[in-house]
Each structure stands twice: as C-alpha cells, then as structure tokens.
Amino acid sequence: MCLALPSRVVELRPGELALVDLGGVRKEISVALVPEAVPGDYVIVHVGHAIGVVDAEEAARTLALFAELEAASPAAGGSA
C-alpha cells in the first residue's frame, strides 16, 4: 500500500527542492514533478517527492480524515 499526504509548501529551495510542513513536521522534498508549486500551496507528497498540487479545501478534508483515523486507532486510545 502506498500513502501520499498533503503538505503545505513553506519555502522553495535551490535545486528543485522545497520545505514542506505537515502538522508541524517540516521536511525537505523534491518538487521536480510540480514546478508550478509555490509557498502556501498544498502538494501531495509520496516518498520525498511532491507528485501533485491540491487545493487547500481538499487538503483540509484529507488531513481531517487522517486525524479521525488516528483518533480511532488503538495506539491513540481510540476504540478501533
């Protein structure tokens, strides 16, 4: 199974790189596949590469679903 998460672009860096933020975790990724991405955009990140740009509403919906899953997981004290 593959998992790709929406992350907010914080800054663009030289060499087709960007710093992204996902819930307070910041990571440097490649934006070679989405050269149109700019700071403030949400990108779908998979194994260190942005593979698409998504609008902020879609990113918020996806992140909310992941938060629900986390809250329901036994490791988080949920009832799953």
Image (cartoon, rainbow, N blue to C red):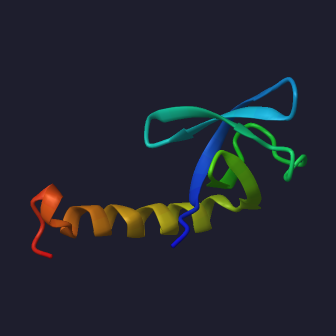
The answer to whether 6 appears left or right of 43 in the picture is left
Give the residue drawn at x 53%, y 65%: 3
Residue 23, image x, y percentages: 44, 43
Q: Work out whether 38 lies above or below 61.
A: above
Q: Work out whether 10 lies above or below 71.
A: above
Give the residue drawn at x 71%, y 48%: 49
Q: How many marks?
A: 0
Q: Quadrant of residue 78?
A: bottom left
Q: Work out whether 25 lies above or below 60.
A: above
Residue 63, image x, y percentages: 46, 61
The answer to whether 19 appears left or right of 65 in the picture is right
Give the residue drawn at x 50%, y 67%: 62
- Nearer to us in this view, 28 or 8: 28
- Nearer to us in this view, 42 or 69: 69
- Nearer to us in this view, 39 or 28: 28
Give the residue drawn at x 15%, y 76%: 80
Q: Quadrant of residue 32?
A: top right
The answer to whether 45 appears left or right of 14 in the picture is left
Residue 39, image x, y percentages: 74, 37
Farthest residue toward the top? Answer: 14
